C-alpha cells in the first residue's frame, strides 16, 4: 500500500523492491529502477546544494516525455519543493506570467521552446535551465540527432549559449557529499501545480497534494483488473504528458509505484510505438481518441504480434466513439489479448480518473462506474440532487479532489456546492446501476487532440488585434485532431487576407499550437443573448447544422 507515502517515497520503495526492473525505455535506451533512483537522488542533491532550492519553493518543469522529466519531478518532491508542471511548448509570455504568479524560483525549459523565442528567454536566463532531447538517446541516435536533426536549434541558441545554464546540467553540475533528507510532512500539503481551464472554462492553477495522487495510484492495479505482480512484469506506453493529470498519475506515477516500465514517447508515432512494444512487454496503453485512431490506421500496429500481452487500454481526454471502441476491440480479439478499449472520466481538479469501465464492471456508452471511495451525484441548476436518469451537472466527492485553486479562494469556493460536492462543469446522468453517462460540457473547453483549449483565452487575445471589434471561438471537427478551433470575427477593415494573416500570426506567437484557429470567418455582427453576452451556443449550432452534425437531445 502506498496511501501514506509521498510521491518520492512510493517510487523509492518500488526501486528497492525491483532494483533490476526496467523503469524507463526511451528510444532504445534502458534505465533500471536502481539507476533511476540514483539519478533522482543526485538531482535532489544538486537542487539543494548547487541551485539553492528549498522546501516549499516552486520549481517550474516544462518538459516532454523524456527521462529528465521523471528525474526532476521526484527530485523536487523529495526535497519538499513544489512541481509547477507546464506544457513544454507554452509560449514565453505565458511561461513568464506563470512564473511570476506562482513565484517560481527556478525553471527547467525544453530547448526547442527556448530556441523559438531565444531573445526573450535571455531576459530570465538566470532562472532557467535548458534540457535537451538528445541527452538520454543511445549513442548512434544521439550522434545523428546532434549533428543533423538538431542543427537549427543549436544555431539559434549558439550565440546565447553562454547565457543559458544546463545544456548538460546532469553532467556539469556536481553533486556534493552532503545528505539530502526526504521531506515527508508535505504529504497532505501542496506539492504539485497543474494548469487547466477550471470547471468554468477560465484558465486556473490547480493545487494538489501527494495524498491525492496516492489515492488513485493505490487502486491502479484494480482499474487494470490485474495483480500487482503483473504490473511489475510489463510496461505502459507513456504518451500522455506529465503536465496532464491523467498522464502524470496513471501513465507515470502509478506504473512506477508498482515496478512497471515506462515506454516514454515525447511525441506519438505509430511505427515507433510498435517497435518499442516489440522491445518491451507492454500491458497497458492510455491515450486520447486521435492516438487510438492513428494506431488502427497503422499496418505495423495491426500486425504487431506483441499486442497479445496487452491487459487493458484506456481512452481519455475526449469522448470516445462507439465505432472506435468496436474497431479497436476487434484487433485485440484477433490477437488474443485480454485488453479492451475502455473509457473513464476525470478532470484536473480531481487529478485523473474517478470513474471508469473495467473488465469486471463495464457498460457500453458510459464513462464508467465510480472508483472505490469516490461518489458521484447529479445536481440541477438550483443545486437540487437529481434521481436516476435525470440530466444535470456531474458532481463528485473523492480522495483525489484538489486542495483548491492557487491563490484564488473565491474561485475555489464557487467550484464546490453547499454540501461540498465538486462541480465538474459537465452535464450527464447516472442510471439505476450507478453507471455515469456524459452528455456534453457545460464549460467552454474544446479538446484538440486531447489538449484542453480555452475559447475565452483565444477571444481575449484576438480582441487585442488592431481592427478587430468582436470575436467568438467555437469547435469544428477535424480528421486528424478530432476537434479544431474556428473563429467568427467582426472587423473594422475589409482586407480579409491581411487581417486573417495578422490574427493567425498573433495566435501562433502567443498561444499553444492546438489553440491556433484552423478557420476564420468574417461576419457583420455576432449574435447576442438577452443578457447581452455573445451567444456562442447559437454560432456553434449554426455551424454544426451547416456541416450536417446532429446531436441527441
Image (spheres, rainbow, N blue to C red):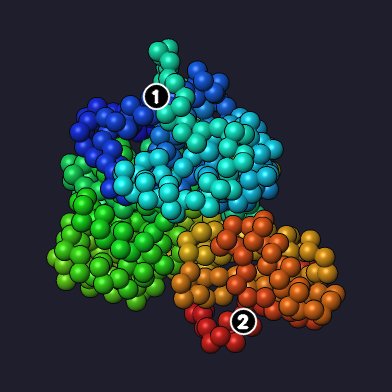
Q: Is residue 87 left or right of residue 135?
A: right
Looking at the image, how many numbered discs can be counted on the residues? Answer: 2
Depth check, front residue: 115 or 19:
115
Q: From the viewer's perspective, tell me whether residue 512 is left or right of residue 525.
A: left
- Give the percent coordinates (x, y) of residue 516: 62, 65
The tag earlier along the polypeptide, 2 or 1, is: 1
Quarter of the image for residue 175 reads top left
Residue found 21% across the figure and 52% down from its top: 279
Q: Which residue reaches farthest top?
A: 178
Residue lying farthest left?
336
Query: Is 111 in front, or is 401?
Result: 111
Position in image of residue 119 (x %, y %): 68, 45
Could you say where residue 1 lies in the image, as x and y percent from the top left? Answer: 28, 33
- Which residue is under mark 2? 543
How many residues crowd mark 1 within 10 Å: few (<14), some (14–19), many (20+)? Answer: many
Up the image or down, 159 lies above or below 506; here it is: above
Which residue is identified by label 1?
Answer: 42
Using the rendered view, name the quadrant where residue 322 is placed: bottom left
Amino acid at each position: 500500500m502506498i496511501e501514506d507515502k509521498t510521491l518520492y517515497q512510493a517510487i523509492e520503495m518500488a526501486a528497492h523492491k525491483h532494483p533490476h526492473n526496467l523503469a524507463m525505455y526511451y528510444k532504445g535506451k534502458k534505465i533500471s529502477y536502481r539507476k533511476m533512483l540514483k539519478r533522482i537522488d543526485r538531482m535532489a542533491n544538486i537542487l539543494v546544494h548547487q541551485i539553492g532550492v528549498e522546501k516549499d519553493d516552486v520549481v517550474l518543469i516544462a518538459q516532454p516525455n523524456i527521462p529528465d522529466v521523471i528525474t526532476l519531478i521526484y527530485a523536487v518532491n523529495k526535497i519538499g519543493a513544489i512541481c509547477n508542471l507546464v506544457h513544454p511548448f507554452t509560449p514565453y509570455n505565458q511561461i513568464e506570467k506563470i512564473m511570476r504568479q506562482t513565484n517560481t524560483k527556478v525553471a527547467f525549459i525544453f530547448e526547442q521552446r527556448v530556441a523559438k523565442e531565444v531573445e526573450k528567454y535571455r531576459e530570465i536566463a538566470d532562472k532557467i535551465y535548458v534540457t535537451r532531447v538528445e541527452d538520454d538517446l543511445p549513442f548512434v541516435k544521439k550522434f545523428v540527432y546532434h549533428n543533423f536533426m538538431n542543427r537549427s536549434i543549436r544555431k539559434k541558441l549558439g550565440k546565447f549559449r553562454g547565457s543559458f545554464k544546463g545544456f548538460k546540467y546532469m553532467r556539469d553540475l556536481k553533486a556534493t557529499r552532503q545528505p539530502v533528507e526526504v521531506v515527508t510532512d508535505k504529504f497532505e500539503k501542496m506539492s504539485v501545480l497543474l494548469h487547466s481551464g477550471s470547471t468554468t472554462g477560465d484558465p486556473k492553477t490547480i493545487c494538489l497534494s501527494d495524498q491525492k495522487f496516492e489515492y488513485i495510484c493505490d487502486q491502479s492495479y484494480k482499474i487494470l483488473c490485474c495483480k500487482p505482480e503483473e504490473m511489475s512484469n510489463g510496461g505502459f506506453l507513456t504518451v500522455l504528458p506529465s503536465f496532464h493529470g491523467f498522464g502524470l498519475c496513471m501513465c507515470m506515477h502509478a506504473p512506477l509505484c508498482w515496478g512497471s516500465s515506462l515506454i516514454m514517447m515525447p511525441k506519438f508515432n505509430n511505427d515507433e510505438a510498435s517497435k518499442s512494444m516489440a522491445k518491451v512487454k507492454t500491458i497497458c496503453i492510455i491515450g486520447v481518441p486521435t492516438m487510438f485512431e492513428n494506431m488502427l490506421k497503422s499496418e505495423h500496429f495491426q500486425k504487431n504480434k506483441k499486442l497479445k500481452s496487452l491487459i487493458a487500454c484506456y481512452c481519455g481526454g475526449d469522448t470516445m466513439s462507439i465505432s472506435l471502441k468496436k474497431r479497436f476491440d476487434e484487433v485485440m480479439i484477433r490477437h488474443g489479448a485480454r485488453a479492451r478499449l475502455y473509457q473513464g472520466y476525470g478532470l484536473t481538479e480531481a487529478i485523473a480518473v474517478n470513474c471508469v469501465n473495467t473488465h469486471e464492471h463495464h457498460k457500453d456508452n458510459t464513462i464508467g462506474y465510480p472508483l472505490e471511495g469516490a461518489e458521484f451525484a447529479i445536481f440541477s441548476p438550483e443545486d437540487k440532487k437529481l434521481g436516476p436518469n435525470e440530466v444535470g451537472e456531474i458532481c463528485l466527492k473523492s480522495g483525489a479532489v484538489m486542495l483548491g485553486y492557487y491563490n484564488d479562494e473565491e474561485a475555489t469556493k464557487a467550484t464546490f456546492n453547499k454540501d461540498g460536492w465538486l462541480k465538474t462543469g459537465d452535464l450527464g446522468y447516472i442510471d439505476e446501476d450507478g453507471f455515469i453517462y456524459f452528455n456534453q460540457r457545460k464549460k467552454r473547453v474544446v479538446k484538440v487532440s486531447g489538449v484542453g483549449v480555452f475559447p475565452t483565452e483565444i477571444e481575449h487575445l484576438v480582441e487585442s488585434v488592431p481592427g478587430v471589434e468582436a470575436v467568438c471561438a467555437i469547435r469544428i471537427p477535424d480528421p486528424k485532431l478530432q476537434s479544431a478551433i474556428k473563429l467568427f470575427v467582426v472587423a473594422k477593415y475589409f482586407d480579409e487576407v491581411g487581417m486573417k494573416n495578422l490574427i493567425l500570426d498573433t495566435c501562433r506567437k502567443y498561444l499553444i499550437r492546438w489553440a491556433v484557429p484552423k478557420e476564420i470567418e468574417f461576419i457583420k455582427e455576432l449574435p447576442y443573448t438577452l443578457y447581452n453576452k455573445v451567444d456562442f451556443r447559437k454560432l456553434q449550432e449554426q455551424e454544426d447544422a451547416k456541416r450536417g452534425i446532429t446531436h441527441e437531445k
